[in-house]
Image: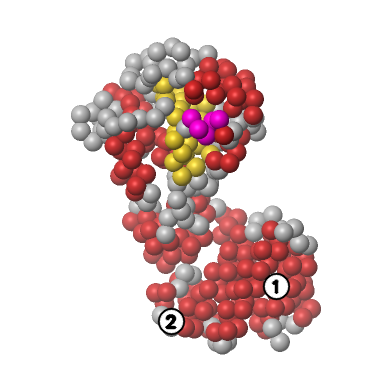
Amino acid sequence: MYTFREIWGNSALVRHLQTAAAGGRVSHAYLFTGGAGAGKRMFANTFAKALQCEGAGERPCCTCASCTAFDSGNHPDVIYVRTEKKSIGVDEIREQILETVNLKPYRFACKIYIMENADTMTVQAQNALLKTLEEPPVYARFLLLAERAEAFLPTILSRVAVMPLRPLPEQEIAAYLREKAHVPAEACDSYAAYAQGRIGRALDLLQDEDFQQLRQDILQKVQALPGMSEADVLAMAKDLEGYKNDLRFLDIMELWYRDLLAAKCLREERFLVEKEQKDAVFRAAKEPPERLARNARAVHEARKRLAQNANFRLTMEVMLMEIKGD
Ligand SMILES: [Zn+2]
């Protein structure tokens, strides 16, 4: 159920929207930005529900006719703009917005359009929407969701209030996983680290069997690496080509070496991310700290080179040989 109390983090933004929904100043159009799993949908839906709420106290009240309609998934005055295609074109804007926006709300205070993946709007679609954003009917509200604001025409950006969702600190995500999602304690820190600041991403990864397998495989590989021959290392680089399109394996490696460093220097389990692997981490953290730091750097460098389109196999070979050392 959507309420502001369910939203963790981004508290300044939450307060801003709560004040608006409680009768403060409301813009006609908002753009929520953030990576996948950052909470854009959560924010937009909660705000829409709060704007339509007829309760006298805290909004959304979750008991009025509007909130009940919203929670049933059938609110007549909250419209989701959708497409089956890769991008939102002029046709979608015309059929789903322009043809209905001048009709008054069916039953409630405003008429709210929620558009996910708004950054896939074509330039023509953005131009088609622009006139409505410039002179919206008094009851109309537009909530656009997008990964990045840069995808929009400056004319659109000048008409919307941009609400950037910030990444959350790892401790906050770990606390959410523990208290709200009831994730086993020893997995909370590692998934909070993999989440890159986004609760939704942590929840997705926890459900993602491919990721679980990837993690198993990579943790095995990094533990086997120090005892390998050069030929084995080159074979491993070839193996890693299977993950060419899933660079999450580098996150797993980076966290592993970060953990080895923590185990070496801080010597306490509570500082580890991979608590489930604590015995293996303490076993592997035998090398001097400089070497462990160098391993983490090697992974970081590899990621940078891949971002610059370096050859994948070669980059893996260099990284693994550097880590294996002499
Ligand atoms: Zn309500």
Amino acid marked by disc 2:
Leu
Q: Position of residue 129 (x, y in %)?
A: 55, 23
Residue 133 falls within the magenta-colored stretch: no
Q: Which mark is residue 113?
A: none
Element class at badge 2:
helix
Q: Position of residue 206 (x, y in %)?
A: 49, 55
The residue sitting at the top extreme is: 103
Is label 1 within 8 A of ligand 1 (CB to nearest ligand atom)?
no
The residue located at (52%, 54%) in the rendering is 205
First along the sequence among labels 2 and 1:
2
Q: Which residue is mark 2?
A: 266
The residue type indicated by label 1 comes to Met
Q: Kindly check if marks 2 and 1 are in contact, taking CB atoms under 8 A apart as contact.
A: no
Image quadrant occupied by the C terminus = bottom right
The residue to which callout 1 is attached is 319
Q: Is residue 131 above or below residue 224?
A: above
Magenta-highlighted residues: 155-159
Q: Residues within 10 Å of mark 1 (few under 14, many from 20)?
A: many
In the structure shown, which secondary structural element does the residue marked by tag 1 occupy?
helix
Please name whichever residue, 283 or 105, is drawn nearer the observer in this view of the structure: 105
User: Is 181 situated left or right of 91 in this image?
Assistant: left
80 to 289, vertically: above or below: above
The residue positioned 58% from the left and 57% from the top of the image is 211
